[in-house]
Image (cartoon, coloured by chain):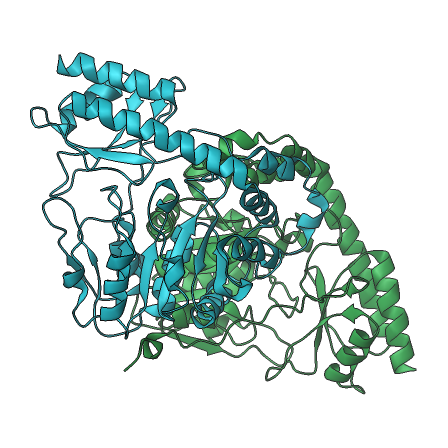
Chain colours: A cyan, B green
């Protein structure tokens, strides 16, 4: 008997490689190639550091109010926290306390299973079809909760409001979480359904379309009942909220709609070009509604392409996992980065 | 059967009141009355917001290296995260996986019981004596872990190395957490014992002696084995670490030893004056090794004093809890704030 017997048994999540060298192209973490709004830079530069001596605004009210205004909701329908991972793990703890398993697709954001393990929540995964589509009929079973990423990752495939409505109608006794981390890049948001379903929780992030991965900021939208349960859970696990600088930066980001639209449009335009170029080279990939593509080549192994690109200083994501181990997840970079990627791929394939 | 049946059942933690009015004296959250180091302000002002588009350094290595250097440790002995609450809740999850209850004093930081409830960890509390002293003999029992705040909160009483050593020697089969949130204000750190005990974890915060409550930054020190278990747990629950600006601010704070010493000395000096003045008015309070005092008056109820001070715009902390409901926890403010407090108390008591 030793204290070592009581250590957690866990497989750590492996994030996209963060190369130590400096001269490389990083298309492996779905980061935005463009900087955050200049108004965010101003908010940081002009931040009065003296106020850091006090704890932050407990419920980040100015930030949730700015989000609510943009989304056409009330502040009591918005919960802000330190990144969507934080929002999701708090949501799992707050909403999934049934003996029945929660359900989610087998191919989706890989954190779901880890949170279930850590929080001792039973779960079942449902296979997506061979084209990576989620079938709403699979979510018409007794469950303790439902989690769907829409558009889904790493598949890049998005579904419309009819799909969400079908899932909601079949799950009136569970909380349904729709993670919209990538929705700004062409997906369909479920926000219009919030007025109809008290058990719908939508999550968002500042890390992708708002270029603030380094800041750790995410939010959730739902009925006042769900949101207040999230605050109660957060207040209990970790008494103090989003740091004061992050709150200021988040507000500046939300309020600069024009910069947001311009950046997103650039990423979408680059993604369409990348998609066409990849298809010309023989890659198969679904139409993406995200800031990445999910591609396979019928003649070459994804692992070989991954290693070749790495040798050229280009980092993409390859998952050594069943069903997707011949696919590459490639983040949409700047046009120059995409050119370099295409040049390297042509060289590999020729 | 409704989704509401599966919501978490929890009593939210109630933090010190954050008054909405602006003209008040806030001595209820153990915040530092002085701003953070001017070097922190410079680090924020000069921070390059463009890098926020990328995820932060995953293990906050420059920050843990700066901390390790100051504490005479190696970087692999230091774990940094978003506030001590975050460090502690991750530690509970990482280290307390026994069927036996973890033990801690009945009068201590009130989050312990909440984390146990959330993480489904069995626990037992051990009463401190009538003078609020922790008796090391109480920790010589089979357990799944030990948590001691030293100096303790809200009692303000610190213990020396002999005490910690006695607890460690009796608990070689459990992880022992010593929370040193307040140690810089005159307590005795257990850092010298880290070389002897692989199962000792020490936690610290930037929120008190370093005036960075608004930033959410804390750290832990321990054997490489404990620290790597913390990283594995954190990587699994919440994939991305301390935000990039907070890392920069933390390094600036750690590297400005002179400002740190000056600020701490000012707080200690004000605390001694406050202690003397309170005793002159008949208050009983132990010698504090923290940035607050824990006082009772034999003739007046703490609640009445609390309400009177509040009516004068002075917020202190009163806990409506067994054994301590006739005590006030008063944060050491600036000299002007202490003068205002003493004037108001004299008026109440006269």
Determine which quarter of the picture holds residue A322.
Answer: top left
Residue B231, image x and y in percent? 37, 46
Quarter in which the N terminus of chain B is drawn: bottom left
- The answer to whether B30 is drawn above or below residue B189 in the figure is below
Q: Residue at x 24, y 56 (%)?
A: A113
Residue A189, image x and y in percent? 36, 53
Residue A264, image x and y in percent? 42, 36
Q: Residue at x 63, y 63 (%)?
A: B158
Determine which quarter of the picture holds residue A182.
Answer: top left
Residue placed furthest toward the left:
A299
| Image-based side of A331 in relation to B29, left or right | left
- The answer to whether A84 is drawn above or below residue B52 in the figure is below
Determine which quarter of the picture holds residue A343.
Answer: top left
Q: Nearer the viewer, residue A122 or B74?
A: A122
Residue B201, image x and y in percent? 45, 54
Q: Nearer the viewer, residue B263 or B36?
A: B36
Quarter in which the C terminus of chain B is drawn: bottom right
Residue B245 can be seen, yes or no = yes
Q: Nearer the viewer, residue A344 or B94?
A: A344
């Amino acid at each position: 008997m030793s204290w070592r017997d009581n250590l957690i048994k866990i497989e750590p999540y492996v994030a996209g490689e963060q190369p130590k060298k400096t001269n490389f192209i990083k298309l492996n973490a779905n980061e935005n190639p463009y900087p955050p709004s200049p108004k965010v830079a101003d908010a940081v530069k002009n931040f009065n550091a003296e106020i850091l001596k006090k704890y932050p605004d407990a419920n980040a009210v100015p930030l949730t109010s700015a989000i609510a205004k943009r989304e056409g909701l009330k502040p009591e329908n918005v919960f802000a926290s330190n990144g969507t991972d934080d929002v999701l793990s708090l949501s799992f703890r707050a909403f999934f306390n049934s003996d029945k398993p929660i359900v989610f697709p087998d191919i989706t954001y890989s954190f779901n299973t880890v949170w279930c393990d850590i929080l001792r929540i039973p779960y079942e995964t449902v296979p997506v079809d061979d084209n990576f589509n989620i079938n709403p009929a699979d979510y018409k079973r007794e469950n303790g909760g439902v989690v769907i990423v829409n558009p889904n990752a790493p598949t890049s495939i998005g579904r419309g409001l009819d799909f969400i409505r079908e899932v909601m109608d079949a799950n009136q006794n569970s909380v349904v979480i729709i993670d919209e981390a990538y929705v700004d890049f062409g997906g369909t948001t479920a926000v219009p359904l919030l007025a109809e379903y008290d058990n719908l929780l939508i999550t968002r992030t500042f890390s992708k379309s708002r270029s603030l991965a380094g800041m750790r900021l995410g939010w959730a939208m739902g009925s006042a009942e769900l949101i207040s349960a999230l605050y109660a859970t957060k207040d209990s696990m970790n008494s103090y909220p989003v740091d004061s600088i992050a709150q200021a930066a988040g507000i500046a980001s939300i309020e600069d709609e024009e910069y947001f639209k311009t950046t997103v449009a650039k990423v979408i335009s680059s993604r369409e070009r990348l998609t066409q170029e990849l298809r010309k080279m023989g890659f198969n990939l679904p139409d993406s509604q995200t800031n990445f593509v999910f591609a396979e080549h019928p003649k070459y192994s994804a692992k070989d392409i991954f290693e070749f690109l790495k040798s050229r200083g280009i980092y993409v994501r390859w998952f050594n996992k069943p069903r997707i181990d011949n696919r590459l997840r490639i983040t949409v970079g700047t046009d120059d980065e995409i050119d370099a990627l295409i040049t390297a791929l042509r060289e590999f394939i020729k």
